[in-house]
Image (cartoon, rainbow, N blue to C red):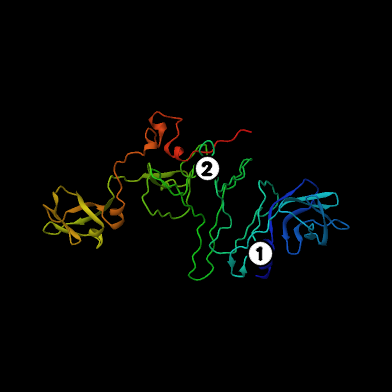
Amino acid sequence: MEKRMMKTTMLAAGLLCVCAGTMPGAQQFPAITTATINAAANQITITGLNLAPATGTAAVGLGNAELTVVSATATQIVATLPASLAPGSYQLRVLVGTLVARFAVAYGAQGPPGPAGPQGPQGPPGTLTLPFAGQASWEGPVFTINQLLGGYPAILGVGGPPDSLGLAGIGLAGVGGQATDPGQVGGEGMAAHGGDANATSALPGVGIYAGGGNATTGGQFGGNGIFAVAGIGPTDNLTYGLSGAFLGPVYVNGNLAKAGGSFVIDHPTDPEHKYLYHSFVESPDMKNIYDGNVVTDGSGTAAVKMPEWFEALNRDFRYQLTVIGQPSQAWIASEIANGSFMIRTDKPGVKVSWQVTGIRQDAWANAHRIPLEVEKAAGDQGHYLHPELYGHSGEPDIHELHHPRPLKKQP
């Protein structure tokens, strides 16, 4: 805890460390991993590898200034900053013999104190001089921010206003590393892991929380929380070329709209080489299906008892009966009432396969009834969800109209 508080104090005192970079060299090439400015002590602490020459001490420079080294080891150097260091971005240099390690450092301006935290008022926030670009080559995160106050984001990105094409700026974007050789896997554009729950009754955090933009004027629609597009190239519609993949149960608190659907499993008789697909059963109604078998008694009568919640959940019952094993007539002697219905046959001891359907009437279904036919919005008129199926190949589909991909700017 003490080390963490010391690190936090140094961070709040005015720094933001951003990128590490090394130049090609020998095996013992020096590398900088962090550079922390302590404005109160007017010092910078540099950590890394191979920071000590065979004899003497490494030379340290920041921008155009040469720094005085206070202490130095192979993994840490403490140096004194210039007497007056203006806010801005600087190149940090550590010269070890004839080899140089470089690092980009942004020194923050002194701003108003941050909000109060568990240890008292937080230090002044640092600022990063923009634009900033850098690169790194070392094992571990290149950019790390530790937000110590609960309920506040560690990183906040706000996109700019629309450009000449009408596309507003992106709040946060990530591009995964490329796979350039056979057998490699490209990197994730963005990876997130919710916070762990380390106490009884605590709940772990979500990996990603996304909320669409609000419609603030009439005639608009709310924005989508997440919009995902599969990478360009062939797809097997199962494991490659997907817009999304979920490894585990998925819950949807609302209606689910889709062009089609199926279950897919390893093929029961050839699981090593094949998949088996079955399509979902579709209906214009919010319909439930129940079925079973029953044998009529000596008088040709059978009572079918339904679950106790059946009539509360369903309405508009419809019936299907099929006799099995012999020719016979079967009919519904009395419809569902008080949790059961009656089947009659013209012979005793007849096996009957029955099916009953009902339309949902629970509170959620009544409040969110699925419409059968809907007019497209004015901006979508004349456009299609799947234009290639209607002789309009090459035209953007409706989702692409709503979420145009930014054009690559020419150099």
108 w.r.t. 284: above or below: below
Asked which secondary structure carries label 2, the reply is loop
**Residue in the picture at 22% in, 59% down:** 311
213 w.r.t. 386: above or below: below
Q: Hey, what amino acid is under mark 2?
A: Ala
Quote the CA–CA distance across marks 1 and 2.
35 Å
Where does label 2 land, which residue? 168
Q: Hey, what amino acid is under mark 1?
A: Thr
User: Left or right: 109 with respect to 349?
Assistant: right
**Residue in the picture at 66% in, 47% down:** 130
Q: Nearer the viewer, mark 1 or mark 2?
A: 2
Where does label 1 land, which residue? 8
**Residue in the picture at 28% in, 57% down:** 362
Q: Residue furthest right?
A: 55
64 w.r.t. 114: above or below: above
Front residue of 316/151: it is 151
Q: Point out residue 238 in the picture as x, y percentages from the top left corner.
A: 46, 44
Q: Point out residue 239 in the picture as x, y percentages from the top left corner.
A: 49, 45
Q: Confirm or deny contact between disc 1 and disc 2 (CB under 8 A).
A: no
Q: Point out residue 314 in the picture as x, y percentages from the top left corner.
A: 24, 55
Q: Point out residue 193 in the picture as x, y percentages from the top left corner.
A: 55, 57
Front residue of 63/229: it is 63
